[in-house]
Amino acid sequence: MCESYRLQCDCGRKQAEIFFGKMLLDERSVNRLYCPACSGDHAEGSPAKVWDNGWVIEMNMELIRGYASTFGVAATDLTAGWIFDQGYVTWVGITPDDAERRNRERESIQALAKTDMLAYIKAMKEWGIEREKRFVGEGWRKMKKN
Protein backbone atom coordinates (compact mmCIF):
# COMPACT_ATOMS: atom_id res chain seq x y z
CA MET A 1 0.00 0.00 0.00
CA CYS A 2 1.29 3.49 -0.84
CA GLU A 3 1.64 5.72 2.20
CA SER A 4 2.08 9.33 3.10
CA TYR A 5 3.64 10.97 6.14
CA ARG A 6 3.65 14.46 7.53
CA LEU A 7 7.19 15.66 8.01
CA GLN A 8 8.33 18.76 9.89
CA CYS A 9 10.78 21.08 8.16
CA ASP A 10 14.21 21.71 9.66
CA CYS A 11 13.23 25.01 11.33
CA GLY A 12 10.03 23.51 12.74
CA ARG A 13 7.73 26.21 11.35
CA LYS A 14 6.08 24.21 8.58
CA GLN A 15 5.34 20.69 7.55
CA ALA A 16 4.70 18.86 4.33
CA GLU A 17 2.80 15.74 3.47
CA ILE A 18 5.16 13.43 1.62
CA PHE A 19 3.84 10.59 -0.52
CA PHE A 20 5.81 7.38 -0.86
CA GLY A 21 4.45 5.87 -4.04
CA LYS A 22 4.69 2.53 -5.73
CA MET A 23 4.96 0.66 -2.40
CA LEU A 24 8.73 0.80 -2.28
CA LEU A 25 10.22 3.59 -0.18
CA ASP A 26 9.14 5.01 3.17
CA GLU A 27 10.01 7.84 5.57
CA ARG A 28 13.55 6.47 6.02
CA SER A 29 14.27 7.66 2.48
CA VAL A 30 13.99 11.32 3.55
CA ASN A 31 16.82 12.74 5.66
CA ARG A 32 15.52 16.29 6.04
CA LEU A 33 12.91 18.70 4.80
CA TYR A 34 13.44 22.44 4.40
CA CYS A 35 10.66 24.99 3.90
CA PRO A 36 11.30 28.25 2.02
CA ALA A 37 12.24 29.95 5.32
CA CYS A 38 15.01 27.45 6.15
CA SER A 39 16.16 26.34 2.69
CA GLY A 40 18.18 29.44 1.82
CA ASP A 41 21.59 27.86 2.45
CA HIS A 42 20.94 24.98 0.09
CA ALA A 43 22.27 25.69 -3.37
CA GLU A 44 20.81 23.63 -6.18
CA GLY A 45 22.95 20.92 -7.69
CA SER A 46 23.21 18.23 -5.02
CA PRO A 47 22.00 14.87 -6.34
CA ALA A 48 20.61 14.09 -2.86
CA LYS A 49 18.28 17.12 -2.84
CA VAL A 50 15.24 18.10 -4.84
CA TRP A 51 14.11 21.73 -5.03
CA ASP A 52 10.52 22.78 -5.54
CA ASN A 53 9.43 26.38 -5.22
CA GLY A 54 11.68 27.13 -2.25
CA TRP A 55 11.15 23.76 -0.57
CA VAL A 56 14.00 21.24 -0.42
CA ILE A 57 13.75 17.53 0.28
CA GLU A 58 17.06 15.93 1.19
CA MET A 59 16.88 12.22 0.46
CA ASN A 60 18.81 9.27 1.84
CA MET A 61 20.46 8.35 -1.43
CA GLU A 62 22.48 5.54 0.13
CA LEU A 63 19.24 3.75 1.04
CA ILE A 64 17.53 4.69 -2.23
CA ARG A 65 20.43 3.48 -4.38
CA GLY A 66 19.85 0.02 -2.90
CA TYR A 67 16.66 -0.03 -4.98
CA ALA A 68 18.34 0.98 -8.26
CA SER A 69 17.73 -2.37 -9.96
CA THR A 70 14.02 -2.12 -9.06
CA PHE A 71 13.91 1.32 -10.68
CA GLY A 72 15.72 0.06 -13.75
CA VAL A 73 18.32 2.80 -13.36
CA ALA A 74 22.02 2.57 -12.54
CA ALA A 75 22.66 3.53 -8.91
CA THR A 76 25.11 6.20 -10.05
CA ASP A 77 22.42 7.82 -12.20
CA LEU A 78 19.83 8.12 -9.43
CA THR A 79 19.11 11.61 -8.11
CA ALA A 80 16.58 12.97 -5.66
CA GLY A 81 15.01 14.86 -8.56
CA TRP A 82 14.46 11.65 -10.50
CA ILE A 83 12.97 9.93 -7.43
CA PHE A 84 10.60 12.89 -6.87
CA ASP A 85 9.59 13.20 -10.52
CA GLN A 86 8.87 9.47 -10.83
CA GLY A 87 6.55 9.58 -7.80
CA TYR A 88 8.58 7.44 -5.40
CA VAL A 89 9.02 10.28 -2.86
CA THR A 90 6.93 13.32 -3.66
CA TRP A 91 4.25 15.67 -2.36
CA VAL A 92 0.74 14.45 -1.73
CA GLY A 93 -0.74 16.43 -4.59
CA ILE A 94 1.09 19.31 -6.27
CA THR A 95 2.41 21.23 -3.25
CA PRO A 96 3.62 20.34 0.26
CA ASP A 97 0.21 21.25 1.75
CA ASP A 98 -1.98 20.44 -1.24
CA ALA A 99 -4.12 17.71 0.33
CA GLU A 100 -5.13 19.91 3.24
CA ARG A 101 -5.56 23.02 1.10
CA ARG A 102 -7.55 21.14 -1.54
CA ASN A 103 -9.98 19.81 1.06
CA ARG A 104 -10.53 23.30 2.52
CA GLU A 105 -11.16 24.81 -0.91
CA ARG A 106 -13.48 22.03 -2.00
CA GLU A 107 -15.48 22.18 1.22
CA SER A 108 -16.77 25.63 0.38
CA ILE A 109 -18.06 24.41 -2.99
CA GLN A 110 -19.61 21.13 -1.83
CA ALA A 111 -22.56 22.81 -0.11
CA LEU A 112 -23.85 23.64 -3.59
CA ALA A 113 -24.32 19.93 -4.36
CA LYS A 114 -27.23 19.82 -1.91
CA THR A 115 -29.07 22.74 -3.51
CA ASP A 116 -28.01 23.13 -7.15
CA MET A 117 -26.20 20.25 -8.82
CA LEU A 118 -25.50 22.11 -12.07
CA ALA A 119 -24.02 25.06 -10.19
CA TYR A 120 -21.96 22.62 -8.14
CA ILE A 121 -20.58 20.88 -11.25
CA LYS A 122 -19.77 24.23 -12.84
CA ALA A 123 -18.08 25.53 -9.68
CA MET A 124 -15.99 22.36 -9.31
CA LYS A 125 -14.87 22.54 -12.92
CA GLU A 126 -13.93 26.23 -12.64
CA TRP A 127 -12.15 25.58 -9.34
CA GLY A 128 -10.12 22.74 -10.89
CA ILE A 129 -9.10 24.81 -13.90
CA GLU A 130 -8.16 27.86 -11.81
CA ARG A 131 -6.26 25.69 -9.35
CA GLU A 132 -4.19 24.18 -12.14
CA LYS A 133 -3.46 27.62 -13.61
CA ARG A 134 -2.41 28.86 -10.16
CA PHE A 135 0.02 25.96 -9.68
CA VAL A 136 1.55 26.50 -13.12
CA GLY A 137 1.91 30.23 -12.43
CA GLU A 138 3.50 29.55 -9.04
CA GLY A 139 6.06 27.28 -10.71
CA TRP A 140 5.49 23.98 -8.88
CA ARG A 141 7.72 21.19 -10.15
CA LYS A 142 4.90 18.75 -10.89
CA MET A 143 3.29 21.30 -13.20
CA LYS A 144 6.34 21.82 -15.37
CA LYS A 145 6.40 20.08 -18.71
CA ASN A 146 9.32 17.65 -18.93
Image (tube, rainbow, N blue to C red):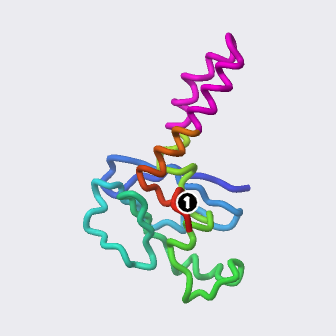
What residue is at 63 percent from the left and 16 percent from the top?
Answer: 112
Residue 141 vs 98, above or below: the answer is: below
Q: Amino acid at mark 1?
A: Thr
Q: Residue 129, relative to residue 56: is it above or below?
A: above
Is-magenta flag for residue 125? yes
Give the quarter of the image for residue 58.
bottom left
Residue at image coords 31%, 62%: 39
Q: Residue at x 62, y 67 (%)?
A: 86
Q: Position of residue 54 (x, y in %)?
A: 35, 58
Residue farthest along the top direction in this orientation: 115
The image shows residue 44 at horizontal and vertical percentages of 35, 73
Using the image as rendered, state which of residue 122 and residue 70 is in the foreground: 122
- Percent from the top left, x then y, of residue 47? 45, 79
Q: Is residue 62 magenta?
A: no
Q: Toward which corner of the image does residue 102 lie, by quadrant?
A: top right
Which image quadrant for residue 115? top right
Which residue does the numbered mark 1 point to in the structure image? 90
Work out whether residue 53 or residue 4 is closer to the camera in this orientation and state it: 53
Of the 4 image quadrants, the one containing the N terminus is bottom right
Residue at the left extreme, as displayed: 41
The image shows residue 59, relative to residue 27, as above or below, that is below
Q: Main secondary structure of the magenta part?
A: helix
Q: Secondary structure at mark 1?
A: strand
Placement of 123 over or under 70, stated as above or below: above
Left or right of 56? Residue 83 is: right
**Count of numbered circles on the image:** 1
* Quadrant in the picture for the C terminus: bottom right
The magenta region covers 100-128
Q: Categorize mark 1 by other alpha carbons within 10 Å: few (<14), some (14-19), many (20+).
A: many
How far across and how far down the image is residue 105, in percent? 52, 30
